[in-house]
Amino acid sequence: MASPALQLLTSTAIFSAPLVLGGLGALTSERSGVINIGIEGKMLFAAWAAALGGWASGNPIVGLLAAVLAATVISQAHWALTQAFRIDHVISGMGLNAIAAGATSMLNKSVLSRFAGTRAAALPLPFFWVGAVLATVAVAYVLNQTRGGLRLSAVGHDPEKARQVGLKPVAVRFRALLATGLLAGLAGSLLVSNAGGFTDNMTSGRGYIALAAVILGGWRPWPTLAACVLFGFADALQLQLQGTGLWGAALPPEAWQCLPYVATLVALMAKWGGTKAPAGLGRF
């Protein structure tokens, strides 16, 4: 039997990886100027598609590709809403989240219910843990060392000045949201790989926590990863603390389940005033 410390470490990796992947997905679009509160819905659609692909084909690669495709389609819908139709970024993102919650619940009951009792084909969890670290390396390199990354940051800082030097913010943001779809798809597929299937609202606010990690990390990849690990640790800790009391008083399970969200709020309050968002965030 594994020691409590090893269990805590493993659980931290399990809970942190989807936050890292989702957070990096949100970061790429936000650095281009698109507010990505809709990352929650993208991850949820990806999880549903991963379960469908894994169950229907029996091949985990098909499930992964289905998740990436679904998240990319939703990401491009978000691009169209914000860039083509110029709908407020927050309103469009929340709309996508609401659609995702309702649509995946309906599709779960009407489509996935036939696979009840079986485990969806999924890739091993360490694949995603390594992928989360490699994705952080890749995003950091692209943003800081490539011409495309510098253009993305320029558009996110001031889209109007970017236009004056010949850049096209709409095209740059299109590519940024393609990256968001890829990363959100990986995050959704990881959730299914861990759970073995799809359940209604299985993201459980992880997209919002991932976005909070981006803010806490100052819209930078490595600090975002560190914030995600912190929140993942809080989630793993509450799991180990279930059934224990506090100062001799018994606590209900729900009290410990609040720990990750309390940690998120405390971290954001501590960071408040010291966070500098991309200047062009939310601007057209």
Image (tube, rainbow, N blue to C red):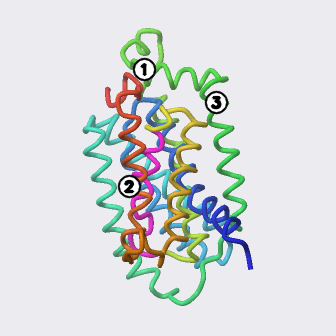
Residue tagged 2: 262
Check residue 142 in the rendering and tell me which mark sits there, or answer none: 3
Quick check: 9 left or right of 86? right
Q: Position of residue 167 (x, y in %)?
A: 47, 17
Of circles 2 and 1, which is in front?
A: 2
Q: Report helix, strand or loop for mark 3.
A: helix
Please report whichever mark, 2 or 1, sits nearer to the chain's N-terminal start.
Answer: 1
Label 2 – label 1 distance at C-alpha: 31 Å
Q: Is residue 127 magenta?
A: no
**Magenta highlight range:** 199-214
Please report whichever mark, 3 or 1, sits nearer to the chain's N-terminal start.
Answer: 3
Of circles 3 and 2, which is in front?
A: 2
Please report whichever mark, 3 or 2, sits nearer to the chain's N-terminal start.
Answer: 3
- Specify whether residue 118 is in view: yes
Residue type of the residue flagged with mark 3: Val
Q: Position of residue 221 (x, y in %)?
A: 58, 36
Residue type of the residue flagged with mark 1: His
Residue tagged 1: 157
Q: Report helix, strand or loop for mark 1.
A: helix
Give the residue drawn at x 39%, y 18%. Answer: 158
Mark 2 and mark 1 in contact? Answer it, CB < 8 Å: no
For this rendering, which residue is in front, 102 or 132?
132
Mark 3 and mark 2 in contact? Answer it, CB < 8 Å: no
Give the residue drawn at x 47%, y 44%. Answer: 213
Dot 3: within a 10 Å radius of its alpha carbon, few (fewer than 14), some, or many (20 or more) residues? Answer: some
Residue type of the residue flagged with mark 2: Val
Q: Position of residue 16 (x, y in %)?
A: 57, 55
Please say if 277 is above or below 88: above
Q: Report helix, strand or loop for mark 2.
A: helix
